[in-house]
Amino acid sequence: MAEKKKTPKSSVKKLESDLKAIEDQALLYAKDLARIFAERKEKERQLELTKHQLARSARIALLGEIAAGIAHEINNILTPAVGNLSMLLMHRNSLSQETVDRIELIEKNLMKASSMLQQILDFSRKMPEKREPTDIGTILDQSLSLLQYKFAENQIKIKKNLHPDLPKLRVDNPQIEQVFTNLSLNAIDAMEPGGTLHIAASYQVEKSARKQPYVQILFEDTGCGMPPEILEHIFEPFHTTKHKGIGTGLGLFICYGIIEKHGGTMDVVSTPDKGTQFEIRLPVA
Ligand SMILES: Nc1ncnc2c1ncn2[C@@H]1O[C@H](COP(=O)(O)OP(=O)(O)OP(=O)(O)O)[C@@H](O)[C@H]1O
Ligand SMILES: [Mg+2]
């Protein structure tokens, strides 16, 4: 039997449906391509961030070593100087009141400098540690209860949002308490009365198999924030914007080191006049 001849109408229909199929396929490819580009962009962003964090970590470690070396040398000079002043004061009866006052003032200032240097030395000598499974919420409460008067005095509110089922972490309790205290004090300094410090902790399980689950702790204030040029250096030793005698610029340097020693990471984002958020990640062993 002779093949039925296609009408022009049916060939148009066939061509239209072919075209539609090609368009659908092209759309799928385009979507795939867009997803691949987005993934690539995200990976590039992560790579940049990791490179930046590594460079910062190396810079802080180097500055820490230099600071410890200098602290050691200066402390060797300060210790006998303080000793000699104490000896002079043993003969205070043969000295005028003005001389005694001046010697006491010098002694007080030298002791202050010495205790500052001691902080760096203790830290760089890797203070003895006692890591035990500990509840992060309990450490946070210890730290906040000691600072209660400071929060009240400065009219700062605290809002806590801790995940109820946080796993215990193997940490050195006093060291982590020191981190929470430093972050709280900085937040208080950065805020006007009426400000709020939000503290949150949650359990995070990374999707990627290589990454360990961790507890994320956030300290977020509604304070003055920082411009990028300050933000870049805040973890370095002696970097402070506070008045002489108020800040030493060692707080965050020590916090950073403590968290690193615990195998964690510490990061910060800040917007001038809006506030600052510190993020700590501590691995769940
Ligand atoms: N929450 C914050 N908001 C705004 N700026 C901050 C905040 N935390 C830290 N900073 C900035 O980072 C600097 C370094 O902080 P860091 O705690 O190391 O030292 P410090 O507070 O100046 O002195 P101290 O050694 O007494 O802690 C501060 O001087 C301040 O400029
Ligand atoms: Mg501080």
Image (cartoon, rainbow, N blue to C red):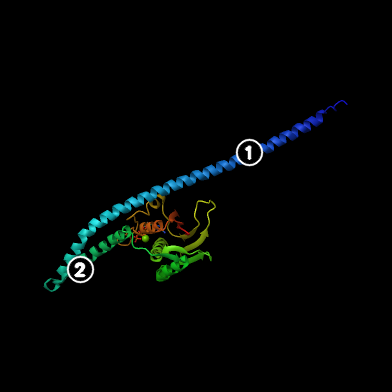
Q: Is mark 1 within 8 Å of ligand 1?
A: no
In the picture provided, is 112 more to the left or to the right than 206? left
Q: Which mark is residue 267?
A: none
Q: Quadrant of residue 129?
A: bottom left
Which kind of residue does numbered mark 2 sit on?
Glu
In the picture provided, is 112 more to the left or to the right than 156? left
In the picture provided, is 1 more to the left or to the right than 66? right
Q: Report x, y in % for residue 256.
A: 39, 56
Secondary structure beneath label 1: helix
Residue in front for this viewpoint, 152 or 109: 109
Q: Report x, y in % for residue 222.
A: 46, 60
Residue that label 1 marks: 29
152 is higher (above) or lower (below) than 17: below
Residue at point 37% right, 57% down? 257
21 is higher (above) or lower (below) than 231: above
* Labels 1 & 2 near each other (Cβ < 8 A): no
Disc 1 crowd rating (10 Å Cα; few below 14, some 14-19, many 20+) is few
Quarter of the rendered image showing ligand 1? bottom left
Disc 2 crowd rating (10 Å Cα; few below 14, some 14-19, many 20+) is some
Q: Is residue 151 visible?
A: no
Q: Residue furthest right?
A: 1
Which kind of residue does numbered mark 1 sit on?
Tyr
Secondary structure beneath label 2: helix
Mark 1 or mark 2, which has the lower sequence index? Answer: 1
Residue at point 49% right, 66% down? 159
Residue that label 2 marks: 104
Q: Report x, y in % for residue 199.
A: 48, 63
> In which quadrant will I find the N terminus?
top right
Q: Is mark 2 within 8 Å of ligand 1?
A: no
Q: Quadrant of residue 111?
A: bottom left
Residue in front for this viewpoint, 214 or 141: 214
Residue at point 37% right, 49% down? 58
